[in-house]
Image (cartoon, grey):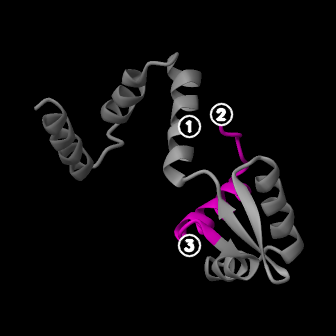
Amino acid sequence: SIHNISDSELELMKIIWQKGGKALLADVMEQLSKQGNSWQNNTVITLLSRLVEKKLLKTNKIGRKNEYRAIVSEEEYQTSQTQTLVDKLYEGKAKGLLLTLLQNNMLSDEDREELKHFWERESE
């Protein structure tokens, strides 16, 4: 199972996934800066180390620099977190999640159309 991670750790994972699953510290710092985030190098290094400990990232030495590589894809992480949510809030029944999304107008018309086409394809 995939470890739970903090919002800050998730922020870093998203950057690494956006970079094709691998990034140097400088790449991560540059992206954080573009997002208006002013975390210090040491903070980011600590968070990246935690992600390595939690087995979401591994490091690769490139000269004297560490390249951080995602072990878990964004899709795998989303699937794992969605399953946790469904188990925790809906007793493992995904229908409950879907009903919540539909009944509370949390899906756009575009989302509904896409889902409709998905189900039509699945039932062929």
Q: Residues within 10 Å of mark 1 (few under 14, many from 20)?
A: some
Q: Which residue is mark 1?
A: 80
Q: Residues within 10 Å of mark 2 (few under 14, many from 20)?
A: few
Asked if labels 3 and 2 touch by Cβ distance under 8 angstroms, the answer is no
Asked if labels 1 and 2 touch by Cβ distance under 8 angstroms, the answer is yes
Estimate the x, y position of residue 53 in percent, counting from the top left.
82, 50
Asked if labels 1 and 3 touch by Cβ distance under 8 angstroms, the answer is no
Marked residue nearer the N-terminal end (2 or 1)? 2
**Identity, as a three-letter code, of the amino acid under mark 1:** Ser
Question: What is the CA distance from the residue labelled 2 to the residue labelled 3?
Answer: 24 Å
Q: Which residues are magenta?
A: 1-22
**Identity, as a three-letter code, of the amino acid under mark 3:** Lys
* Residue 120 forms part of the magenta stretch: no
**Residue depicted at 74% across the width and 59% down the height:** 58
* Residue 16 forms part of the magenta stretch: yes
Estimate the x, y position of residue 45 in percent, counting from the top left.
84, 68
**Left or right: where does residue 81 sit relative to residue 113?**
right
Q: Which residue is mark 2?
A: 1
Question: What is the CA distance from the residue labelled 2 to the residue labelled 1?
Answer: 8 Å
Q: Which residue is mark 3?
A: 19
